[in-house]
Amino acid sequence: MKLLPGVLCAAFAALPLSAADVAITVVTPARTARSIADVPGDVEVVTARELETAPGATLNDKLVNLVPGAVSSRANGIYSFTSAVTLRGLPSSDQGRTLVLLDGVPVNTGATGAVNWNRLAAGEIDRIEVFKGPASSLYGSGAAAGVINVITKKAAPGYRAGASYGTYNTFGASAGAGARIKDLTLSLEGGYLSSGGYNSAPEALRTAYTVNKHMRQKDASAKASLDLGSSGTVDAQYARHEGLYGEGTRVITADGASRRYSTDFARAAWHGDDGALAWQTQAYYQLEDYSRLNEYYKGAVYGRVNTVALRQDTGGQAAVSLPLAGALATLGADYKLASVDAADHNALPLPAYDDRNRGRLSQYAPYVQAEKKLFSGRLKLLAALRYDNATYFDGYFYNPSGTINLVNGPQRRHYWDSFSPKAAAGLEQYVSYGRGFRPPSLEDMCLTLLKGKGAAQRLNVANPALKPETLNTAETGFRLAPLAGLYIDPAAYYTVGRHFMYTTDTAENVGGVIVSKKQNIGRVRIYGAELPVKFYAGPLSLAAAWAWSESGILAYTGNTALEGKTLAYAPRHTVSASVEAKF
């Protein structure tokens, strides 16, 4: 089995290759526009039409049905309050290794690495570019497995409205309007979604306090675009999302055990291309106001815990592409600052007390990428290098109950830095190597939280001693068009991760509850292959894909019993197929 990645690569290299001539322009692989045929890597483009017809109630559900090798951990459809989409065989329990962008800026929170997929409405999307494989040389931490860039529709004149009704009294409505005033275009969008939900508990386990999972969700956004002619375009947008998700139990309060998310997102960008020079610069701000109400009966005692967390992400980025020494060079830099301030208020039973958790993480990174074409453009070469430095500071955890005293009080400052190189070459077939870098998420270092229920319940404790992880990946693939309308894009990859961050049980327990902690595994290995096939013939389109991956823990001195085991939530085989006829 260990020889399989090499056998696949050799087999790919031996096949007669013919590049697919696809006239698609993408921006994600270089941050400025490129023809997809010039990218020595694996890029998928999902159109608005494909999203509209794809199965799935939410954007991440649709993506895993459209993108070969993408997997999702979402278990409860539109009622889920946590979900993830991951690539390249990495565990679907952790979004933090696959970077998600909204119009080019990250929406993964620095506090957890997670993405609130509920606020990314499929109806407002123009296209999605999925750049697989390590992209840390351009995008830094969080892009070790790849980048999913959600590109929304531009502000445009006109209006639209729609409504839907379905199972579980699920009602949705949306409306939008836009106007153009000379070179300025403005638009407004709004949406509402609610569902009475369903009871997910088996009948034998239901009690007087078991109720339907339910949800209510409101979204609003405003966009403006100013055309400056040869000086480029200035875009601005603001969006607000409010969501409530019931967890299926209620004792006294109206919504019962539930989670609320209020997210404000703002972005301003200036971009353009005058033929010789292409540029883009952006600034963004994201504030997630999260709260959870947990109420329960433990024996005859009523309990209530209120959790609140403010998660903020602020940043800016700039990039320019220009001819330099016979190559096309991209120079740029990123800065971002993430913070979390969270508290658990144990309201009942008395005495009441608060747990406090907070921390901040700043990251700065310059990068350079060079692209060169040879032999009339048939051979594409790429080399890139990024320097990341990250600082964790103002870390603090306090539990006045004395239950967990392992990290009580202020935490010391941490500083990490890393170089992330990438090299790729494509002559019909592409081969590439890249290194991914990811510092710990804030809440893994400063947050202690009780998770799960019953035998699966764990007290997940903070670990301020976490180190950054690195993932080294080699991959190969090609694009075939052996017949008119037939496209085949096989790919294979091999990844070795060091200091891989992974949650494992410890030997401790508190009140009979097992203590778990995110820790650094010495070394892991992940490898696999993907085979997507598409065929277009007039009004008929067919698509099918198969993806396979294997993962394993190679070395873990903290718990040698886990060596040789498969990573939890890592996919083995995924298969999808679809057929569509347009009339």
Image (cartoon, rainbow, N blue to C red):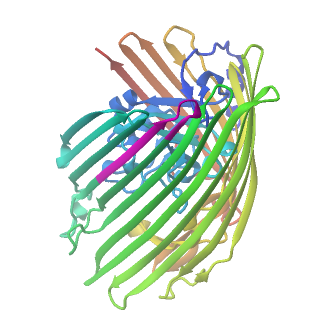
Residue 225 colored magenta?
A: yes
Q: Which residue is found at the position 50% from the left and 51% from the top?
A: 107
Along the viewing direction, whichever of 147 and 542 lies nearer the viewer: 147
Say above or below: 331 vs 24. Answer: below
Residue 388 screen position, x and y as percent: 71, 54
Say above or below: 300 vs 285. Answer: below
Q: Quadrant of the N terminus?
A: top right
As drawn, which residue projects farthest toward the front? 182
Q: Which residue is found at the position 72% from the left and 29% from the top?
A: 431
Residue 95 screen position, x and y as percent: 52, 51
Left or right for 421, reference 411: right
Left or right for 158, reference 125: left
Q: Can residue 434 be seen in this view?
A: yes
Prevailing SS of the magenta stretch: strand
User: Which of the 4 quarters of the picture holds residue 182?
Assistant: top left
Q: Quadrant of the C terminus?
A: top left
Left or right for 17, reference 296: right
User: Where are the magenta residues, as a range?
Assistant: 218-234
Along the viewing direction, whichever of 452 and 370 lies nearer the viewer: 370
Residue 120 screen position, x and y as percent: 40, 46
Q: Which residue is found at the position 62% from the left and 65% from the top?
A: 361
Q: Can residue 570 be seen in this view?
A: no
User: Which of the 4 quarters of the picture holds residue 154?
Assistant: top left
Residue 415 colored magenta?
A: no
Residue 470 screen position, x and y as percent: 70, 52
